Image (cartoon, grey):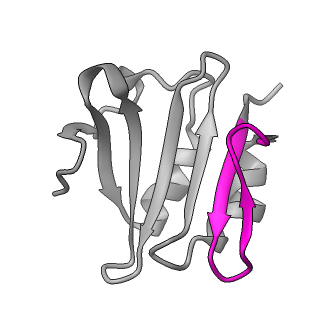
């Protein structure tokens, strides 16, 4: 059985918004088929929460046509993340582990909240 996650998102084009509390269960195939292509504006985001309440967030940057993927770690006052191309995000989602543990994302590096590369 494929891993499933609780998804939350906001898409500016349609005004569609689902909070983390309202989240819906999805698997990686659903994310690729129905959600990823809807990240088109700087205000758009998509979050996935694993069964341990760890979040993986995807934010789109229209200016560079890239995606910031991150795992926020509040206790460390930052997140582990990386800038990815569309194809990089697809590969990330296709290979998502059932739990979002930082070592499972070797290309991610630590960034303090409020600081971006």
107 sits left or right of 90 in the view: left
**Above or below for 106 versus 82:** above
Residue 37 among those drawn in magenta: no
Residue 14 among those drawn in magenta: yes
Image x and y of residue 17, in percent: 72, 61
The residue lying at 55 percent from left, 68 percent from top is 44
**Above or below for 68 versus 26:** below
82 sits left or right of 15 in the view: left
Image x and y of residue 36, in percent: 63, 63
Examine the image and state in which quarter residue 37 appears: bottom right
The residue lying at 68 percent from left, 40 percent from top is 20
49 sits left or right of 15 in the view: left
90 sits left or right of 2 in the view: left
The residue lying at 16 percent from left, 57 percent from top is 117
The residue lying at 24 percent from left, 42 percent from top is 113
Image x and y of residue 78, in percent: 26, 34
Find the magenta span and give its range: 6-23
**Above or below for 18 versus 75:** below
Q: In which quadrant will I find the N terminus?
A: top right
């Amino acid at each position: 059985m494929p891993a499933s996650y609780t998804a939350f998102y906001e898409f500016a084009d349609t005004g569609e918004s689902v909070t983390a509390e309202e989240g819906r269960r999805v698997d990686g195939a659903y994310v690729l088929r129905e959600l990823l292509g809807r990240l088109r504006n700087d205000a758009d985001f998509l979050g996935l929460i694993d069964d341990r309440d760890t979040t993986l967030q995807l934010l789109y940057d229209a200016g560079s046509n890239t995606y910031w993927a991150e795992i926020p770690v509040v206790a460390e006052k930052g997140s582990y993340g990386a800038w990815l191309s569309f194809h990089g995000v697809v590969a990330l989602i296709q290979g998502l582990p059932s739990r979002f543990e930082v070592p499972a994302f070797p290309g991610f590096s630590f960034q303090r909240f409020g600081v971006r590369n």
